[in-house]
Image (cartoon, rainbow, N blue to C red):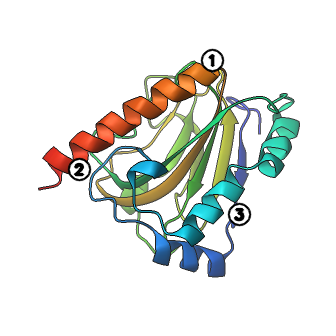
Amino acid sequence: MDIPCPYLVVENFVPPRVLAHVLALWPEIPSGGSFPRSALEVPPALAGFLEEFEGPKLKKLIGRKFGLDLEAAPSMVTLRGQTRARDGRIHLDSPSKWVTLLLYLNPREQAWPDHAGCLRFLNGPHDMEDYEAEIPPYGGTLVAFPNHPASWHGHREYVGPRRSVQLNYMHRPQKVVSEKLRHHVSAFFKKHFLSS
């Protein structure tokens, strides 16, 4: 799809049987925000799944899809388990991010009342209801899009469990280091000061 910006949606990217296994291995993430996998207790089987997801095969396919040479692009993976009221506001991704992949790992039967928590690609930065596409965050669906001046996205307010893996192909290696450090510091404070 190319309106309002290029994006790709692959339903059942993670097949139902694999999704059930991934959900059984999913680490406890009691607070909102993004966590690097090194800040979580990730079982070996899930770590292997994440390494495959971050690997060169998918990167090559995504690069081909969007006409980008991603071969040398460093990558960063973060996990989410909960969504807060402030999450999902209309935004563009950081300029340091070249391409974003979102892998939604919520059961298909999970309810999303009034489309809350469903990702929307928007026609501009001002109106959540002026959208070109809406993607429910369930069933192993993969969403990918390059960072683009018109790649406005967000979702209606939702508070509760909303599991996802975010994979970013970055422009510069030093930004990966600084972003990972930021996520580690954030994870530390969430774990020690916000989990009680």
Q: CA distance from mark 3 to mark 1?
A: 27 Å
Residue 159 point in image, percent of width and height: 28, 54
Label 3: state its secondary structure. loop
Badge 1 density bin: few <14, some 14–19, many ≥20, Cα 10 Å: few
Give, as a three-letter code, the residue at label 1.
Pro
Q: Could you tell me if residue 39 is visible in this image?
A: yes
The residue singled out by tag 1 in the image is 149
93 left or right of 172 in image: left
Residue plotted at (87% across, 30% down) = 67
143 left or right of 113 in image: right
Q: In the rendered view of the protein, which quadrant contains the N terminus?
A: top right
Return the disc, 3 or 1, that comes first in the chain's sequence.
Answer: 3
Residue 5 point in image, percent of width and height: 69, 29
Return the disc, 3 or 2, that comes first in the chain's sequence.
Answer: 3
Label 1: state its secondary structure. loop
177, 171: nearer the viewer: 177
Nearest-to-viewer mark from 3 and 2? 2
Question: What's the mark number on residue 9?
Answer: none
Tell me where residue 52 sits by quadrant. bottom right
The residue singled out by tag 2 in the image is 191
